[in-house]
Amino acid sequence: MAFGRKKEEQKEQEKVKKSLGREIFEWIMVFVVAGALALCVRTLIFEPVRVDGESMMNTLLDGEFMISTKFDYLFGDPERFDIVICKYPNASDGKYRVKRVVGLPGETVELRGQDLYVNGELMEQPFEKRENLRDFGPFTVPEGHYFVLGDNRSNSRDSRDSMVGALPRTMIKGHVRVVVFPFTRFRVMEY
């Protein structure tokens, strides 16, 4: 009788061990699946991004959090005046930058003081922080590239800088759609 009882206790302990092992495995699988889903969402759908610096003032302020959508550019290309998140080709820090697309592939971009000309036509820029700047260009944007500027052009490292230049399409990662934090400054981006 004691032998039978020991065998039952042993089976019960094995059952508990299997249950505990299975429970741990299931929790690990939950985290793996959740991580994979989060990676897919962040890679293909949208990504939260924090503004770091003053290059997009007064449109975006230092420390604001915004949502950038990525699916727009999976099947389409950036348009003029889209606010985008991008990476710089020669930057080793891997950080996203936030800039505005002003020149499309094949266009000629020129800055004369405060004024932006694209293919010789003066562009209206209600978003730009107006100030006197040195002239730039004319510069012809290579095919497959985009010319980006910060709205606060006197405090922006952008396509005017020879170390940045016009960005290859692959460096533009998302389209800024909405500022979500701080909540008091929540807004949908118009341009």
Image (tube, grey):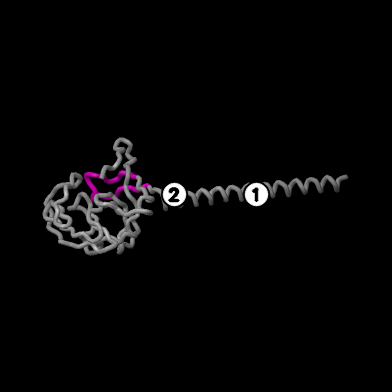
- Who is closer to the viewer here, 113 or 145? 145
Disc nearer the start of the sequence (2/1): 1
Tell me residue 107's x, y (percent). Answer: 21, 59
Q: Give the range drawn in magenta.
A: 48-66
- Who is closer to the viewer here, 109 or 24? 109
Residue found 36% across the figure and 48% down from its top: 69
Residue 139: quadrant of the picture: bottom left
Residue 77: quadrant of the picture: bottom left
Q: Quadrant of the N terminus?
A: top right
Tell me residue 186's x, y (percent). Answer: 31, 38
Residue found 22% across the figure and 46% down from its top: 57
Q: Which element type, helix, strand or loop, lies under badge 2?
A: helix
Q: How crowded is mark 1: few (under 14 residues within 10 Å), some or many (20 or more)?
A: few
Asked if residue 79 is among those painted magenta in the image, a careful observer would answer no
Dot 2 amino acid type = Val
Indicate left or right for 60 with 174 as reference: left
Which labelled disc corresponds to residue 22?
1
Tell me residue 160's x, y (percent). Answer: 20, 59
| Dominant SS in magenta | loop
Q: Nearer the viewer, mark 2 or mark 1?
A: 2
Dot 1 amino acid type = Arg
Q: How far apart are marks 2 and 1 (CA)?
A: 28 Å
Mark 2, residue position: 41
